[in-house]
Image: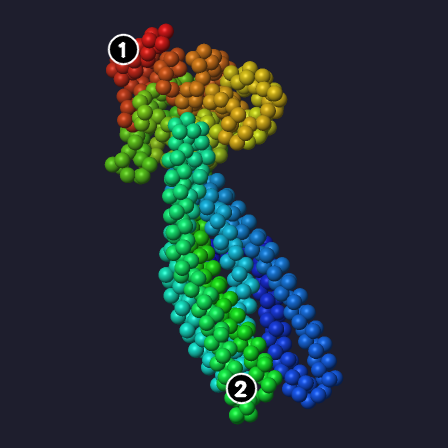
Amino acid sequence: MIKKLTAHIGEFKRDTIMAPVSVIFEVILEVLLPVLMAAVIDRGVEAGNMNYVVKMGVLMLVIAMLSLLAGAMSGVFAARASMGFGRNLRKAMYDNIQDFAFRNIDHFSTAGLVTRMTTDVTNVQNAFQMIIRMFVRAPIMMISALFMCVTISPRLSLIFLAALIFLGCVLAFIITRSFPIFDQMFKGYDRLNASVQENLTGIRVVKAFVREDYEKEKFRGATKNLKDLSISAEKLVVMNQPVMQFTVYTCIMLVSWFGAKLIVVDGTMTTGQLMSLFTYTMQILMSLMMISMIFVMTTMARSSAERIVEVLDEKSTLTDPKHSVLEVKDGSIRFDHVNFSYSDDKEKCVLRDINLTIHSGETIGIIGGTGSSKSTLVQLIPRLYDVLEGSVSVGGHNVKEYRLETLRNAVSMVLQKNVLFSGTILENLRWGDKEATEEECRHACELAQAHEFIEKMPEGYHTYIEQGGTNVSGGQKQRLCIARALLKKPKILILDDSTSAVDTKTDSLIRKAFAEEIPDTTKLIIAQRISSVQDADRIMVLDQGMVVGFGTHEELLKDNDIYRDIYELQQKGADTDE
């Protein structure tokens, strides 16, 4: 895990090395100061030699300034290294997520990915900065100060050895007990983010159904759970501070007592040595306190690190072949004994034994009840998922033989859930073709019956679309998404229930424009209304993941009971409306 994370230090290796080097230089200078202070007391103050006091005082001042400079430089290097490390981690995670197949995305919740890229990376970033500064400083300071204490008084040094053993046991207890709680705490953050994201995304539905109180209660539950976990973890972590203070004060008292006896009774220690020993005592104990803080921080960061590595290690289930086909010849499609399951379990297939041949340029309607796997079927064409058994071919080649980019550039898909991004209408349209001229965008909008309402907007095609397209209606959003798909000039155009929010007249005009303007493009239209697909070359009827009918409107009315029932039901509804 550590190796995977440190691989993302990247161009900040120099800063990562210079930070601990500066810290080591700072520590060496700090350790020298008590020795010089003892000399000033013993050889200068007690001997009445003021020249020696001044000379050593100037030297101590220079050393202190150099130590201060080294400390400041280590802070600069560590900050630059940790910020850069955090940036690289986020970029690596984001880049990997962009390559995820739908199956990979299904493994992680959206809120979980957001938490990993924000809170978790911040925890690891802070721990990294602490490691390259404090984790270097504390052990070196402790070892150096202990060495100096041993040279001054080996017997008094045993006090620190006992303190080390005691604190080590306390730290081990805190770390082993708190790590599982921190792990649960970050999952609590995921649930909290999920609650916020879900509420903000569906705020209109919440208000329409007057469910504000329910959402408040759900959020309160998520925050209470997170609070309880945080308190449980903090109850353990806060033990660290009082234990450290108890150890510090105990050591100072013991050093004072035994040190005074060595001076007064035994005469084996000077006053200057005792003063320097006090300083080394504080340095040792402050180092111990730093080490305990580091262990607590790294315990928290360990949970975050594992969650980050999970994302970095996740490999897309879809890969390009070594010798890939680089061109889609036409829009012909063939399903050959296709079975598909989201869980890769043959017993839970949502598509079963699909056999279809669709000719290039055909318009195919797809009808079926809710849950009949209409959307799943068309998602296999641009290889958003891979089949469990059988094969899907486009343009005469198995979709697995194409580079993903090549295949998906040839297939335009307007998903069931239409998404617009913040930016102008033109910027959204150019997702279909980033080089498209304004005239080409206008023509695509005319085909999608979007041009008229765009022209009525305050700034026309330069009107700003809010995040998620909240300032346009559902029907307008659908038409803009269709126009965007047309700009790709695809070999295959898939409309997944993409005209459900437009009136029948507009729906008819869109289909007419398709027939006249893009006759060579294969068009697959999923619809709930038979009127939206009855003019198609052929219509596919899906039921419980199987094709139960495939033919023209007239043929299906004559031979297919499911299609006839849907048609009669819709006709009866239309007559009632009239």
x then y, percent, for residue 284: 52, 74
> Where residue 547 appears, x then y in whole percent?
29, 23
Q: Amino acid at mark 1?
A: Lys
For the residues marked 1 and 2, what is the alpha-carbon distance in whole angstroms? 110 Å
Quadrant of the image containing the N terminus: bottom left
254 lies above or below 540: below
**Mark 1 or 2, which is nearer the eye?**
2
| Image x and y of residue 329, in percent | 46, 26
The local secondary structure at tag 2 comes to helix
- The local crowd at label 2, few if under 14, some if 14 to 19, many if 20 or more residues have their Cα within 10 Å, is some
Q: How many marks?
A: 2
At label 2, the amino acid type is Ala
Quadrant where the C terminus is found in the figure: top left
For this orientation, the residue located farthest to the right is 51
| 183 and 159: which is toward the camera | 159
Say if mark 1 contacts mark 2, CB within 8 Å: no
- The answer to whether residue 325 of the structure is visible from this angle is no
Residue at figure coordinates x 46%, y 73% from the top left? 247
In the rendered image, which quarter is residue 453 located in? top right
Q: Which corner quadrant of the image does residue 231 belong to?
A: bottom left
Residue 551, quarter of the rendered image:
top left
Give the residue displayed 61% in from the left and 63% down from the top: 74
Where is mark 2, residue-wise?
A: 260
Residue at image coords 41%, 73%: 166
Q: Would residue 9 be found to the left or right of residue 416 on screen?
A: right
Q: In the image, what residue occupies the spot 59% across and 57% down?
A: 79
